[in-house]
Amino acid sequence: MTAAGKWKAATLGLVVVVLLLLPQVVKSSFAIDIFIRILLFSFIGVAWNLMGGYAKQLSLGHAAYFGLGAYTSTIMQIDFGISPWIGMIAGGVVAMLASLPIGWLCFRLRGPYFTIATIATAQALMLIFLKFRDLAWGAEGTTIPNLGSSPLMMQFESKASYYYVVLGLLALGLFITHKIEQSWMGYYLVAIGEDEDAAEAIGVNAPRIKRDIYMISAFLTALAGTFYVQYIYFIDPATAFSFNISIEAALVSIVGGIGTLWGPVIGTVLLETTSALLQSWLGSTTGGIQLTVYALILMGIILWRPTGLMGLVTDAYQRYQHRKPARA
Amino acid sequence: MLEIIAQAVINGLLIGGIYALVSIGVTLIFGVVKIVNFAQGEFVMIGMYISFYLATQFGIDPIVSLFVSMPVLFVVGVLVQHFLIRRVLGPNDMPQIFLTFALSLLLLNLSLMLFTANYRTVHTSYSDEALHLGGLYIPVAKLIAFVVAMALSGMLWLFLHTTDLGRAMRAAAQNRDVATLMGINPNRVFAVAFGAALALAGAAGSLLMPFYSAYPFVGQVFVLMAFVAVVLGTLGNVIGALVASLMMGVAESLGIQFVGADSGLIVVFAMLLLTLAFKPNGLGGGRVR
């Protein structure tokens, strides 16, 4: 292993240890709640980034899969008593299957109009769940029965347990991204993201690759949906298909560094910390302040740092490498 | 039965005129500057608030305040193009999409902070007036809005086809590089296109005010309609956008009449999805004018 590789492994190990010990050290439930939000949105961002970041298929409709995952597991749990652990996987499969027709439609458009079509599909799904009361409780939604401590039903007494579940999800997302980055598929994705026509000209089967990555991305996003409604014990169409989910998924990746492994995580840490600080300073009375600040950060990044915070980090690292005398 | 259908069609056409102003703006920016302005709806919202404050503070009629909202938004458009959009033009989609998207997010949430989420209405002398033609009922405020919207669309068409600047805009839309070689200054053309598009959005806002409430999220309703109309009418095509907007208005209105009051959006999404499935290049078949 090279020296740089060793440093990387050591840093990663340290991060893992800190993340594992965090809920044992920090006992404030407010703080753990923020950690859970950070991990959850990092995970959603990682799922989005696979398609939006590497292949540059900029979706603003990932709430569709978040909502499908949430509703699948909740319907299975309440109507059939099936554990949300199984429901979570089922939700992922439902989202994967749903991504096929949705992708078939949306991939007919490119660039901004692809983005608009994805918004429309997520909104259309929300309307379906609002309108058809027989399907799933309509606009009022439903609370998820609280069984007390029941790990088999994904219900825990301590917030720390939820923390470990979502940490596991994020680790899964990062592992899958890492594997894809190193595979042929990763190169195909980047080629499509750079120039789809050129990629096709050199023999990349772009429609198939886009379809596959959309399925993976949808699957992972649905897992986050199940986790989220289990965590807040409530589901309704406005929560499950919230446009804010789609926005945040894209935002954290772009702010952190689009198409990079750690970008979504760094972006979420920055945005969620900012949002938590704003809330504690101003209280929740001032509606709109959080998204106003998000919008300003997003504009700043796009105008001055299109590579995101990860770009800053790699630039600084390269400058440091250049200053260091070369070693044999 | 026939009368109900006729009434629904009239209602749809009248609101479709407003959709047309928004979609023509979207398609003009897409055609000339080659970006999609996600914030177009928020400029409709700003137009509405301008008219609302002029009406409540100075007693100016919302239709008359068009002469304020249009120039103000034209200038805003030129500034937005010059200081923001110009910096992200290029082959890369990501910054363009998310810059205008961030602008939309910013304007929406700023207005939420400044104006609160309350619904604001202006009551004019003609807000409740209506013409009766046979058994049909035509609200005066919507009729005025429709007529002015069509007049403005016609003026834009004339501008694009008879003036030098308009021709320069169409030339830049067809081929930016060749247009530049012919001595057209693309930055100037883009700024005018963006300004004109925002002026139309401002006009839509002012025209809506006598019969529609202003609130921070109001633009979302119209921009969604506009996006669908622009896909339906073939991207970048002004007349296509106009016709498609009127169709969307009628389809929405028929949906409300026969399916249910809250089904307007479902009809819109259904139309978008059907268009994508069967006519992804729009009804015009892909010709961009």
Image: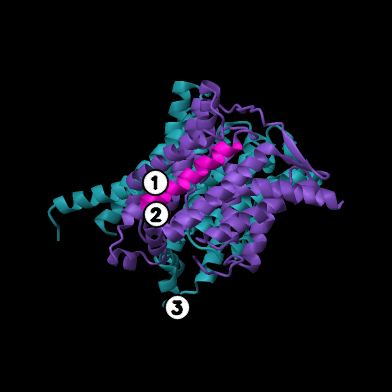
Q: Residues within 10 Å of mark 1 (few under 14, many from 20)?
A: many
Q: Which residues are magenta?
A: B190-208
Question: Viewed as shown, does residue B284 lie left or right of B165?
Answer: right
> Which chain shows up in cyan?
A
**For the view shown, which residue lies furthest in the right direction?**
B1
- SS label for mark 2: loop
Q: Are marks 3 and 2 in contact (CB under 8 Å)?
A: no
- On the image, the x and y values in percent for residue B151 come to 56, 49
Mark found first going from the N terminus, 3 or 2:
3
- On the image, the x and y values in percent for residue B261 come to 76, 42
Mark found first going from the N terminus, 3 or 1:
3
Q: CA distance from mark 1 to mark 2?
A: 8 Å
Q: Are marks 3 and 1 in contact (CB under 8 Å)?
A: no
Residue type indicated by callout 3: Gly
Q: CA distance from mark 3 to mark 2?
A: 24 Å
- Which color scheme did the rendering employ for the protein? by chain
Q: CA distance from mark 3 to mark 1?
A: 31 Å
- Determine which residue is flagged by label 1: A256
- Determine which residue is flagged by label 3: A203
Give the chain of mark 2: A
Is the same chain shared between marks 3 and 1?
yes
**For the view shown, which residue lies furthest in the left direction?**
A325
Give the chain of mark 1: A
- Determine which residue is flagged by label 2: A260
- On the image, the x and y values in percent for residue B176 come to 35, 64
Q: Residue at x 39, y 46 (%)?
A: A256
In this rendering, which labeled residue sits more in front, label 3 or label 2?
3
Residue type indicated by callout 2: Thr
Question: Viewed as shown, does residue A325 lie left or right of B190?
Answer: left
Task: In the rendered view, tell whether residue A30 sits above or below residue A182.
Answer: above
- On the image, the x and y values in percent for residue B222 come to 59, 45
- SS label for mark 1: helix
